[in-house]
């Protein structure tokens, strides 16, 4: 299992219930690809974007720290692309902090 950071944006005009529903869908998706959520949080509640995405000028950013097999990341990306409420997403593998002696 590798550690990844998943950031995704949803339209900030959605109600709190709809936003939590999208968050739950992403959580279920990570579980579906045999992954584990280490930490999940709303990173930025309302952020003005540089350009409109799906006619929305503001988005809510979520940050999930997840553990998933490297072979399942492509499947996770495909499933996130299908979800129409996830406007954009990014999955990265954070670099390990190197301690200098």
Image (cartoon, grey):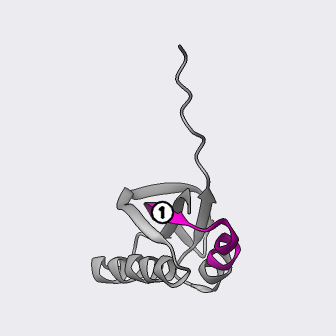
The x, y position of residue 60, in whole percent, is 42, 64
Q: Is residue 11 left or right of residue 73?
A: left
Q: Residue at x 37, y 77 (%)?
A: 19
Q: Residue at x 69, y 71 (%)?
A: 71
List the residue tagged with mark 1: 66
Answer whether residue 61 is magenta in the image. Answer: yes
Q: Residue at x 63, y 86 (%)?
A: 82
Give the camera-side residue of 39 and 58.
39
Q: Residue at x 53, y 61 (%)?
A: 6
Q: Secondary structure at mark 1?
A: strand
The x, y position of residue 77, in whole percent, is 66, 74
In the displayed orientation, state which residue is furthest to the left: 17
The residues colored magenta run 58-76
Q: Is residue 54 left or right of residue 85?
A: right
Give the camera-side residue of 57 and 68.
68
Could you classify mark 1 by the number of other residues whose Cα lies within 10 Å: few (under 14), some (14-19), or many (20 or more)? many
Quadrant of the image for the N terminus?
A: bottom right
Q: Is residue 52 above or below residue 93?
A: below
Q: Is residue 15 above or below residue 70?
A: below
Answer whether residue 95 is magenta in the image. Answer: no
Q: Is residue 29 above or below residue 74?
A: below
């Amino acid at each position: 299992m590798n550690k990844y950071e998943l950031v995704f944006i949803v339209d900030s005009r959605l109600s709190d219930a709809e936003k939590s529903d999208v968050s739950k869908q992403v959580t279920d998706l990570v579980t579906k690809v045999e992954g584990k959520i280490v930490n999940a949080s709303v990173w930025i509640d309302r952020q003005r974007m540089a350009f409109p995405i799906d006619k929305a000028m503001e988005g809510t950013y979520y940050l999930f720290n997840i553990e998933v097999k490297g072979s399942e990341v492509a499947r996770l990306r495909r499933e996130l692309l299908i979800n129409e409420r996830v406007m954009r997403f990014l999955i990265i593998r954070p670099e390990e902090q190197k301690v200098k002696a």
